[in-house]
Image (tube, helix red, strand yellow):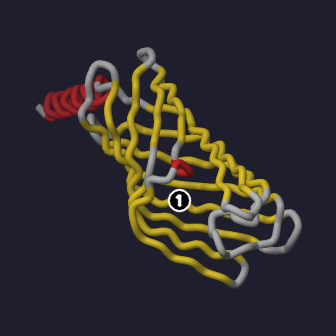
Amino acid sequence: IMKMKFFLLAAMIFAGVSASYAQETTMWIGGSVGVWSSKVKGNDGTLSYKLEPEFGYVLNDHFSLVGSLGVMHSENSGLASLGTLDAGGNEADGFTIGASVRYSFLKGQFGYLFLDGGVNFSRLKYDSSDIKESRVMVGIIPGVAIRATKRITLNAALGALGYSRYKRGSKTLSDFGLNLDLDTFELGFNYTF
């Protein structure tokens, strides 16, 4: 009888584990590219870009965990992201790292909408000086995903609702709000496996 109970318990555990693995466990790799240009009348303009690979793990039909690590470059950075907090540099290079929870909704045959809620840290170093810029952003980024094939999804994101804190040298700037500037626009893709 003890062997029979052990066998039944083992069979139930095996059936439960098998059922949980039968559900599709989906992960993806991909990334996004962001390019933006800004110019203030009477000043030099800024051209910046960001390349940000990402990894995602689907928890269920609506929620995924997303991690990203990327590189950034900015030219004629006198304007850069802090506007009047001029670093006096012409070029800057840096990195960005982020983590978020993606909520997917309005799913259909051709794609879905999503909201990424998370935190992102970035750091820039100016070539012509010792000045460094760091930024922490906590917020929600809306986007759309369009299925190109069964495994490839094209993504676009625009805007952010949240809190950002910038620090450049000894100067600090904090802001909170909704940002719909084109400098937040990113295009990307994901490959699901």
- Determine whether, in the image, residue 94 is placed left or right of residue 27: right
Q: Position of residue 111 (x, y in %)?
A: 34, 26
- The residue lying at 67 percent from left, 56 percent from top is 39
Q: Residue furthest left?
A: 1
User: Residue 136 appears in which quarter of the rendering?
Assistant: bottom right
User: Which amino acid, mark 1?
Assistant: Asn
Q: Residues within 10 Å of mark 1 (few under 14, many from 20)?
A: some
Q: Is residue 74 left or right of residue 175?
A: right
58 and 17: which is toward the camera: 58
Residue 31, given in percent of the width and then of the height, sits at 57, 37
In this picture, residue 8 sits left or right of residue 181: left
* Residue located at (76% from left, 72% from top): 87
Residue drawn at point x = 70 percent, y = 84 percent: 170
Check the image and name the residue furthest to the front. 42
Residue 179 or residue 59, whichever sits in front: 179
- Pick the quarter of the image with the N terminus: top left
Q: In the image, is residue 17 above or below residue 76?
A: above
Where does label 1 land, which residue? 120
